[in-house]
C-alpha cells in the first residue's frame, strides 16, 4: 500500500489492519515491511517452513528474501547459493493455491480491485 497525498495515514492504517486481520483469521503467516518512512508498506503472505527451528544453518524465506535481500548465515552459504536454489526456496515459501485463493477472496471482500497479471 502507498500512502500518497490522496490517502491519509489513518486510511492506510485501516486498510493494513483489515488485511492483516484477514490473514490472521485465515491463519496465514505473513511479513510486513515498512518503507519510505512508513509511507509505503509491503505485506507478504507466505507458508511457514520453520526450517531454522530444526537447523539454524538453513536459509529461511520471509519478506526480505522475497525482495531479494537474502539473510545468509555463513559466507560459504552465500557464495554457493545459486539462482535455481533461491528460486526453489521462494517456491517452497509461496502459499499453496487454495490459501492464495482465500487471501484473494478476502482482499476482494475488503473492496480491493485485483487484476490477473500476465
Image (cartoon, rainbow, N blue to C red):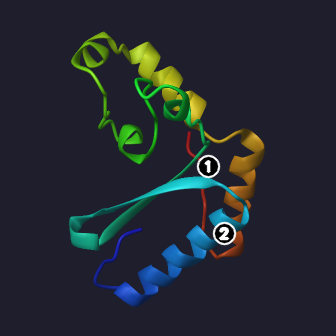
Residue name at image x 65 percent, y 76 percent = 110
Q: Position of residue 76 (x, y in %)?
A: 26, 12
Pick the front one: 80 or 1? 80
Quadrant including the N terminus: bottom left
Residue name at image x 47 percent, y 23 percent = 87
Residue 99 lies left or right of residue 71; in this view the side is: right
> Disc 2 marks which residue?
22
User: What crowding class fits label 2: few (fewer than 14 Cα within 10 Å), some (14-19), or many (20 or more)?
Assistant: some
Q: Position of residue 30 (x, y in %)?
A: 54, 54
Residue name at image x 42 percent, y 47 percent = 63
Is disc 1 placed on a helix, strand or loop? loop
Residue 112 in sight: no
Quadrant including the C terminus: top right
> Disc 1 marks which residue?
116
Q: Give residue 92's quadrant in the image.
A: top right
CB of mark 2 within 8 Å of CB of mark 1? no
Q: Position of residue 58 (x, y in %)?
A: 45, 24
Task: Relative to 14, say whether 20 is above or below.
Answer: above
Count of picture labels:
2
Pick the front one: 80 or 51? 51
Q: Which of marks 1 and 2 precedes in the sequence? A: 2
Is disc 2 placed on a helix, strand or loop? helix
Amino acid at each position: 500500500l502507498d500512502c500518497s497525498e490522496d490517502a491519509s495515514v489513518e486510511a492506510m492504517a485501516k486498510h493494513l489492519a483489515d488485511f492483516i486481520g484477514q490473514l490472521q483469521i485465515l491463519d496465514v503467516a505473513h511479513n510486513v515491511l515498512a518503507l519510505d518512512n512508513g509511507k509505503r508498506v509491503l505485506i507478504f503472505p507466505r507458508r511457514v517452513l520453520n526450517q531454522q527451528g530444526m537447523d539454524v544453518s538453513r536459509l529461511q524465506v520471509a519478506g526480505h528474501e522475497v525482495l531479494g535481500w537474502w539473510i545468509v548465515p555463513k559466507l560459504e552459504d552465500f557464495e554457493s547459493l545459486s539462482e535455481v536454489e533461491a528460486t526453489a526456496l521462494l517456491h517452497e515459501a509461496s502459499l499453496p493455491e487454495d490459501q492464495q485463493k482465500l487471501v484473494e477472496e478476502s482482499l476482494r471482500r475488503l473492496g480491493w480491485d485485483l487484476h490477473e497479471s500476465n
